[in-house]
Image (spheres, grey):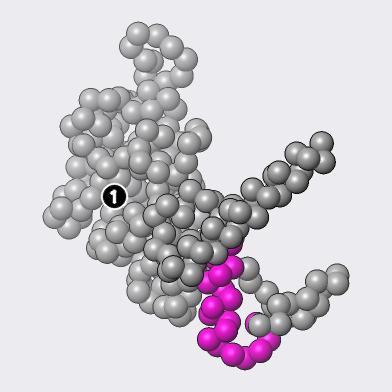
Amino acid sequence: MKFYVLTLFKEMIEKGIDYSVIGRGIEKGLIEVEAVDIRDFTKDKHRRVDDYCYGGGAGMIMAAQPVYDAYMSVKKRAKEGTRLIYMSPRGKTLTQAKAEELSREQELIILCGHYEGIDERVIEELNPEEISIGDFVLTGGELGAMVIIDCVSRLVSGVLNKEESFMNESFSDGLLEYPQYTRPPEFMGRKVPEVLLSGHHGNVEKWRREQSVIATFEKRPDLLEKAELTENEKKLIKELQNKCFCDTISNNEDL
């Protein structure tokens, strides 16, 4: 899979792809990342790519022309129909489901904004898919682009050492991941749950699933609305809700 990243900070992308999952994917020839410097396409003799905002206001705006020309230069080389993604705080929030969808593409073009954004006219002309990595503001889209490259790359077949290594991770089935443990079997008085030492794979899987449900209930209950749950798991959630209700009543009585 190949990623084209349109950016003002080419080095930031290039220095971030040599590590961990992305780096291994590149070494295996399964992932390719090409950072394209938008400044190379400006017609300004001082290589400026930004200007003041019409109507006033703080900050600078990336000009339409260099962004458009940078994209067109990549479009000529990319496969026909390659999706253009614009890292934008007004886009839909990136999810695991979206990452899985994007991992089925052969190539992706990612546009990184900077300063106070990009001239709206080029956004209207190119009509990219806008994606956000969260409800907060970053200085530029480069970090967001790296997040997409990372979470999508690890879903590309062969990038990870074992296919199952991402099958049971958080969000892969709508739930958070279960707790994980390694040696030693006891640390500061805390022991690894006995079921994990039993060697009984069926019991281990049952325990892990229950723990995923519990973790999701406690930390991200909003995810449970869309998760596919068995009747026993729904019963478990009901028990957890009742326990929380009773605990709340007890605490109020203590006050």
Q: Position of residue 123 (x, y in %)?
A: 25, 32
63 versus 185 height, above or below: above
Q: Position of residue 52 (x, y in %)?
A: 38, 15
Please state the extent of the stretch shown in magenta in the rendering. Answer: 196-214
204 versus 149 height, above or below: below
In the image, 46: left or right of 129?
right
Q: In which quadrant of the rendered image does the C terminus lie?
A: top right
Q: In which quadrant of the rendered image does the N terminus lie?
A: bottom left
Please name the residue shown 49% across and 66% down the image. Answer: 233
Q: What amino acid is at disc 1? A: Ile
Is-magenta flag for residue 138?
A: no
Q: Number of labelled discs?
A: 1
Please name the residue shown 40% across and 48% down the image. Answer: 94
- Say which residue label 1 marks: 109
Please name the residue shown 48% across and 62% down the image. Answer: 234
Q: Secondary structure at mark 1?
A: strand
Viewer-proximal residue among 241 and 200:
241
Please name the residue shown 43% across and 69% down the image. Answer: 230
In the image, 249: left or right of 19?
right
Is-magenta flag for residue 206?
A: yes
